[in-house]
Image (cartoon, helix red, strand yellow):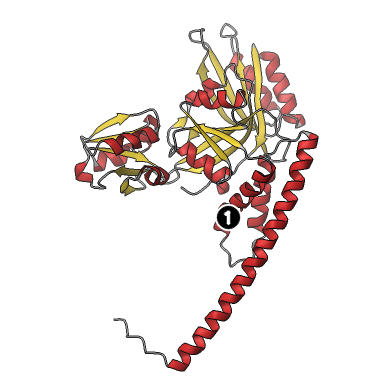
Amino acid sequence: MNQPREASSPAAEAEAAVELARLRAEIDRVDLALLELLNQRAGLGCSVGELKERSGMPVYSAARERDLLAGLVRNNPGPFPSAAIEPVFREIISATRSLERRLRIAFLGPEGTYSHLAARRHFGEEAALVPTATIGDVFAAVERSHAELGVVPVENTTEGVVTQTLDAFIGCELTICGEVLQRISHHLLSRSGRRDDVKRVASIGQVLAQCRIWLERNMPGVERVETGSSAAAVRLATEDPGVAAIGSALAATVYGLTTIEAGIEDRLDNTTRFLLLGREAPARSGRDLTSAVFTVSKAQSGALYRLLDPFAQGGVNLTSIQSRPMPGKPFEYLFFLDMEGHRDDPSVARALADAAATAYSYRVLGSFPRATAAEASPP
């Protein structure tokens, strides 16, 4: 049982008020010092922007931002929480970068999708986010210079590869220039916020699959409706009180819906990997991934073995192997390989050359700074 607090004396209250005023004045002084330092940083950013413009260097550097944030977390003595460093400095970087040039970032829209969430968290509020209708439209926006960069989902820890993204690389000359790991937490959203009102549950197919067990246990017999995007499902829920959408907390805010249940994904480690698409290849960073796509002759016995063997012989670790049907050639396939290292690393360059010698055709899709699980943005 809690004991009632003893009333403090007027003298003690007066002393506490004086001390509070002193601490607040000290905080104000520190805030002004922070503001002065932020403006110094902004001035340096302007100088960097002028140098980049004169020399033709890209405004965005995934490796620079990754290493800067990692260094800040590593050198943080506290008590400022390390978990807060990344979102705070993302916005500082975004604001400073906007003085160089406001980046246009294409993403799979509309607003409120998980691609929107990943783009906003990675590039900050000062980036100009450009929604598109399809993943293919993200590629087209960057190819036609309607955006400097594009954000597309490529794989999820629960449901695997996003085939539309792999297929969009066919015939495309863009390069992969970075990756973003985004923790995905799904919310069940409706107008009323009452589970008893729900007659149908709507979302994109991948999202419905990521919540399959929860839906079977908690909403058996309720119809599931597949939509083109999670945000399209949220818009449907705004129009129909009998529809609950599975979407992000951001979508609930954007469209004014109420959360029935938060965190309904079946796996707590549910994470989506997004690729950053651009027209300029990033420099070697020392911690990179390389993506390439190969075709082999189906008439050649052991062709896939011969394609993969140079990587094993050269000690190059393959982190992913995916196959996709080749357009116009039934039962022939494209093989997408992800490997540790940069295409300019001697071991990677040698393995790629040896694999290309056995392949019918190949193209390197990009060498880019690698994200780590520790860098995954919170949901």
Q: Helix, strand or loop at disc 1?
A: helix
Residue drawn at (58%, 67%) of the image: 79
- Give x and y (percent) for residue 325: 50, 15
Question: Where is 226 relative to 44, above or below?
Answer: above
Image quadrant containing the N terminus: bottom left
* Nearer the observer, 208 or 112: 112
Residue drawn at (62%, 26%) of the image: 145
Q: What is the tally of numbered marks visible in this picture?
A: 1
Query: Label 1 amino acid?
Result: Val
- Give x and y (percent) for residue 254: 40, 43
- Give x and y (percent) for residue 106: 55, 32
Question: In screen coordinates, is 252 left or right of 108?
Answer: left
**Around disc 1, counting alpha carbons within 10 Å, would you say few (fewer than 14), some (14 to 19), or many (20 or more)?**
few
Residue drawn at (34%, 35%) of the image: 235
Name which quarter of the figure residue 280 lies in: top right
Question: Where is 291 relative to 128, above or below?
Answer: above
* Nearer the observer, 120 or 163: 120
Question: In screen coordinates, is 163 left or right of 285?
Answer: left
Name which quarter of the figure residue 99 lies in: top right
Residue 152 visible (yes or no): no
- Give x and y (percent) for residue 167: 52, 20
Name which quarter of the figure residue 179 lies in: top right
- Kindly identify which residue carries mark 1: 88
Residue 247 visible (yes or no): yes
* Nearer the observer, 141 or 173: 141
